[in-house]
Each structure stands twice: as C-alpha cells, then as structure tokens.
Amino acid sequence: MTSQQIKILMVVVALGALAVIVPNTNSFVILLSTRALAFAILVMSLDILLGYTGLASLGQAAYLGVGAYATAILATTYQFGLGMDFWLVILFGMLVGAALAAVFGLLAIRATGVYFLMITLALGQCVWGLAYRWNSLTGGDNGINLRVKPKFAGLDLGHDVTFFYVVFFLFALSLLAMYVLVQSPFGRSLAGIRERELRMQILGYNTWLHKYIAFIIAGGFGGLSGVLWAHTAGIVSPENVVLTTSVDALLMAVLGGAGTLVGGVIGSFIVFGLREYLSTLVPWWQYVLGAVYVLTILYLPFGLMGIPERIRQWRASSGKQADPKTLASVPS
Amino acid sequence: MTQATPQNGAPPVLELKGLSKSFGGLHAVRDVSLQIFAGDRKAIIGPNGAGKTTLFNLITGIFPSTSGQVLLYGEDVTTWPSHKRTALGMARTFQITSLFPKLTVFDNVLLAIEGLRPSKFVMWRFMSSYRDVYDKAHQLLKQASFLDRKDTEVRYLSHGEQRQLEIILGLASDPKILLLDEPAAGLSSGESSEMAKFLLGLDPNLAILLIEHDMDVVFDVADEISVLHFGQMLETGTPEQIHGSQKVQEIYLGTG
Ligand SMILES: Nc1ncnc2c1ncn2[C@@H]1O[C@H](COP(=O)(O)OP(=O)(O)OP(=O)(O)O)[C@@H](O)[C@H]1O
Ligand SMILES: [Mg+2]
C-alpha cells in the first residue's frame, strides 16, 4: 500500500469512528460535532484557496453568510426548504455562494499576497455591513430565528442524531469532492500557481482563470456550509459574517495544517471543542485559544497534520545521517 | 540585418519588428528586429545588463513592449498574454531557475505537459488517471536520463539538475520555438558541454533562440550570433564572423 492509500484509509476510519461514536454520546457533543462539521466545510473550502492555491482570503465568512441568510429568509418568509425542498435550498445556497464569489473574485483575484488579503477582508466587511443594516431582509442586529427544521421522507432534522447524520453525509461528500478536485489536473494546476505563478503562465495556463474558478468553487462550498450552519445554530445573525468568523476559519485551516483538507476539519473540531468546554470553565478562555494559534504558527508551521513529518525529520537528523533525499540528489 | 532564409515562403516562426522597452528613463531594449525560422539555431550574446532577458520578457509577454511588434507565425501577438503565445508553440526557460520547488520532478513535468491540454480544467478525475500524460512525462524524463530522480522534490535537486529540468519543462509542450535564457548559468564546464550536447540532440525542426555567456555552448549550438549592447543589436553574423569582429572584441569578448 502506498503512503497515500494509508492516509486515505486513516481518514475513512476516523470518519467512520466519528459517525459511530458521536451519536452515542450526549446531545451536547452531538450538537457540537454537527457545528464543527458544518463549519469544517467552510474551512476546507478556504484551504483550497489558502493551502492549495496560496491565496489567503480573509473574507470567507461572507459565503457562509449568504448561504445561511438565504436559508433563513427562504424558511421564514417563504416557508421554503422545510421539506424535501431542503435539498433545493442546499443547491441554492451553493449557487448563491458561488455567485457572490464570482462577483467578488472579479475584484479580488488580480491582487496577490497581502493585497488579496485586504480586498477579501474589505469585501467580507461589505457583506457584514449589509447583514447589519438591511433590517427588512436580514433582521439587522437581531438576525433571523429559524424555529423549525426540515422534515421529509420520515426524517426529522429537528432530531439531533438525524441532523448530525445529514450534516455528516454532506460533509463527507464535500470532502470527497474537494479531495478529487485537489488531485485532478485542475487541482494540480492550483499547486503550480501557488509555487510559481509566472512559470505557469509561460507553460500555457491562464492563471487568472484558474484562480477565479477556484475562488468560485470555494464560494460554493462556503454557501453549502452556510445552509447547514443556519439549521445547526437555529439563528442567522451578522455575527456569522463578521470578520472574526473569517479569521476563525483561516486559523482553523492553519492550526490543522493548510494544504491538507482534513487538517481544517481537525482544526474546526479543536477550536469548537476548546471554545465550548473552556468557556464553561474559565473566563479567560480566549487567551488559551490565542496561545494555541500563536504556538502553532511559531512551532508547527505545517499545523497539526505536519507533526508526523516533523517527527520523521527529527529522527532523521538525530540519526547522524542527513535527509536521504539530499544525498540521493548529488549529481553522478 | 539578419540574412533571412525564408523556407518555401513560410512565415518566420518568430519575428520581431522594431521592438523597444523602456523602464522609466532606461532604454533596456531599443528597436530590435529579428526573424527566426523553423530549425534555426540563433544565439544572443551581450554584456550584463544589455537587455537580453528583457528581450525574452517582451517576446513571451511578461512585460508589455513600449513600441514595436512581436509576430508568431505571422500573427501579431504583441498584446497577447503569455499563455496564449505559449499555445501558438512558444516555450522558454529562465535565467533564474523557475521551477515548482515543493513538487516532485514528475509533478513538475506533468504540469508542463498539461499546460496546453484542455484537460487542465478537469476537476472530477484524478490526474493519475491520464495515462497518456503520464507516459509522455516518463518519456521526457527518460530522454533526459532523469527517471531515477522523478520522485525527488525539485528543491532537493542540485543546481545543474535544476537547470536541466528547466529545459525539460520547456520541451514538454512540444514547442516550435524554444527560448533559452542562459541554460548553462552556474554550470561546471563539464555540465555545460553536456548541456550543449543535449541541445544539439533536439528535434532539428525546433527553432532555438539562445542567450548564453558561455561561449563554448554558444559556438557549439548556434549557427548565427547576434550581439546586444545597451539594448541594441550591434552585429549579427556566423560564429566565426562574431569571433573575429573588432567591435565585438571590444565590448564583449574583451571584457567577458
Ligand atoms: N523589471 C525591471 N524594471 C526596471 N528595470 C529593469 C527591469 N528588468 C530589467 N531592468 C533593467 O534593464 C536592463 C537590462 O536588463 P536585463 O536583465 O535584460 O539584462 P541581461 O542582458 O539579461 O543581463 P544579464 O546578462 O546580467 O542577465 C538592466 O539595466 C536592468 O537593470
Ligand atoms: Mg539576463
């Protein structure tokens, strides 16, 4: 078995364990896991940009936001999406997220590095401003409460285990789709752009277009994350699109390990877990979270997923031999 | 000017007409004209800062030119983005190695091959399922005796190997014209002559425009040499003519 296959097997086993264990715990853990999974879709979509394309977006909450608001508005104003049409809302949420990214991408994609960061931040703040001010549509500061959850085909999403499984299913599908994407020719081209964009242009790639498409896809998954988030949280408010939500997503991706997809999932679970447990224990829990971030960035630049590689390197260097790769590459 | 050798009336693969580029007040390239036909092997030499790399950047569309024209197969591509010029059959290498350092040698070559294929937009199939692309990458690496290092990350390659991979990436798109910017830069003399031999073994129909400071490589590979000085084409001729030219001796060979 190749190391790639072993990794896939490990992820499958971990997800299987999650699907078996979580429903047998208490409702607090079930709800927490559901939230972490819904948000993890956003973190993974951000990882496509950050880890695979090298674009650090600081406005990714906007896509979660439009997906969530679309869901809440459809449900409360139009009673739409509370039955079988829930699946249509899923589709619609993705489309809205992708459409917003298609507009924002036109402005953001030309910029690189810190300018990209600032433009996405500014665009994200525009969405937040709209959510906050457009009272008649968004309920302003109070947000929108979703009192009922979808029911269809004998499934009641108001039942927390059922809802967990629905979110788990969509999460797993998203992970699969994004995994195939990053391994596809298109996904590989994103890695090339991350490594050396100019060379990619000379090789015949319209790098702008590739980045733009990646940005739209990330927006689409962000929208999906928002639909699930709306029903998980039961309320959609400007807090969902505020800057800290974008920062959270970015830090979760970095904490778990950018460019790994599953790292973002681990990051999401750790942050949601720490936040929920610590906040009941100590009033200074935010500092703990901050310290975790700082330590990760300082000592684990490749995140938690980078730990096995770190250990391997440490073993190799302490075993008096240099990295075998550098030895192998001495010209003959 | 260049002794144009139109072969059965076909337009030149690459033609430059009065190409110029200024950076603010600095005229890096001035009024350069050039014709390159299929199978031509031409070299551009000139002292540091003469504008050679800038000329390549104009030809490949990295910089917009200040005035003049770039034509590929008679088509005016002066305002085209780089990737569209590549699609017409142009490829280049870089003076400063410009590879994908954290990807393996094989992945580097795969990216280079995919560059002109429509499948570069496919996102629902694994890259590894494209047998033809994999076979081609294999064949390219084999031709350059690189297969044994295919799974090595490029950043772990020696400088000489990276220079060689530069050229492999350039060849991956089956170009009609290859622009080489100092392929032998930083190579030992043994490695340089290997490099020259490798270049001589390439498809005779491929047009090559070579920038090089290593005169052995230039004299081995090129049939015609142009001298660039302060952005201007000073002289063009056979290697013997250039070697014997008094002017060239003064500005270039004397100092180099
Ligand atoms: N992007 C740029 N902006 C401003 N000036 C530039 C730029 N690129 C090149 N130049 C200037 O243009 C002139 C020509 O540079 P170029 O790199 O083309 O020289 P070269 O002939 O390739 O030299 P070398 O043999 O050292 O590679 C130099 O004076 C250089 O400083
Ligand atoms: Mg140069």
Image: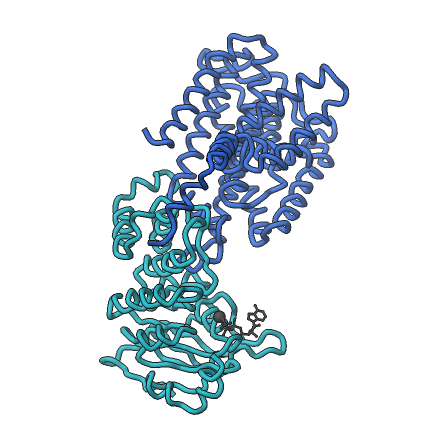
Residue at figure coordinates x 34%, y 42% from the top left: B127
Quadrant of image for the C terminus of chain A? bottom left
Residue at figure coordinates x 44%, y 39% from the top left: A321
The colour scheme is: by chain
Task: Tell which residue pokes out farthest to the bottom in this image.
Answer: B246
Give whichever of B113, B247 is nearer the camera.
B247
Task: Tell which residue pokes out farthest to the left in this image.
Answer: B8
- Regarding residue B169, the answer to whether it shows in the image is yes
Image spot of residue B237 (x, y percent): 35, 86
Left or right for A288, reference A75 = right
Residue at figure coordinates x 54%, y 11% from the top left: A159
Q: Quadrant of residue A144?
A: top right
Image spot of residue A38 (x, y percent): 55, 25
Q: Colour of chain B?
A: cyan
Task: Tell which residue pokes out farthest to the front in this image.
Answer: A320
Image spot of residue B90 (x, y percent): 36, 66
Please say if B28 is above or below A95.
Answer: below
Please say if B29 is above or below B3.
Answer: above
Chain the render paints blue: A
Please say if A184 is above or below A21.
Answer: below
- Regarding residue A96, the answer to whether it shows in the image is no
Q: Quadrant of residue B185?
A: bottom left
Give whichever of A220, B56 is nearer the camera.
B56
